[in-house]
Image (cartoon, rainbow, N blue to C red):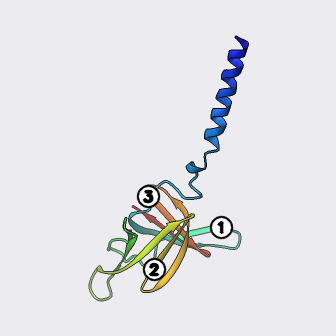
Amino acid sequence: MKTKNLLFALALSIGLFATSCNSSDENEGDTIAPIEGKWSLVKVGATDNNGTETLGDPPQNVSGCNHDYIDLQLNNTLVSGDYDSKVSPCALTTLSGTYSKGDSKVTTVLNGVTTTYDIVNLTLTELKLKQGNLVWVYIR
């Protein structure tokens, strides 16, 4: 009986060790939440030298208009939407480009300009990006 229990415990230990060391389950810093979707800009800000973050309402969001946005598509294309009232109330201007995501970063290409952001937070409802000391917060 002792031998059976010992063999059972040994087999269980080997099984647990083998499944815990499986490298195919690693996400390598990426999150499981999908980045694809339409994200509305709700906060912008910066971090100071001590790492303290200060966020506020985006000055680029025109009062009375929808929020500016980025729309990240499944085919790695993106549309950046900017609502502006300079020409007509809440006129929408869009730019098309591409993006790629990996290793907790997202890289965008708009008008031939490539920009890489760190993904600080990505959930089903929030996307927080950082570049240098600048911070952008988007929601779905």
Which numbered disc flags the more N-terminal residue, 3 or 2?
3
Q: Earlier in the sequence, mark 2 or mark 1?
A: 1
Instruction: Determine if residue 29 is in view.
Output: yes
Residue located beneath label 1 in the image: 52
> Which amino acid, mark 3?
Pro
From the viewer's perspective, is 22 left or right of 40? right
Residue appearing at x 40%, y 63% in the figure: 36
The reply to whether the C-beta atoms of the residues labelled 3 and 2 are less than 8 Å apart is no
Residue at x 66% of width, y 27% of height: 11
Q: Real-space Cα distance between discs 2 and 1?
A: 29 Å
Please say if 7 is above or below 140. Answer: above
Residue 65 position within the rendered picture, expressed as x and y whole percent measured from the top left = 32, 74
Q: Which residue is mark 3?
A: 34
- Point out residue 55 in the picture as x, y percentages from the top left corner: 54, 69
Which of the 4 quarters of the picture holds residue 79? bottom left
Mark 3 or 1, nearer chain start: 3
Q: Nearer the viewer, residue 24 or 128?
A: 24
Question: Is residue 69 at all visible to an observer of this figure?
Answer: no
Q: Secondary structure at mark 3?
A: loop
- Look at the picture and state if 37 lies above or below 68: above
Q: Nearer the viewer, mark 3 or mark 1?
A: 3
**Helix, strand, or loop for circle 1?**
loop
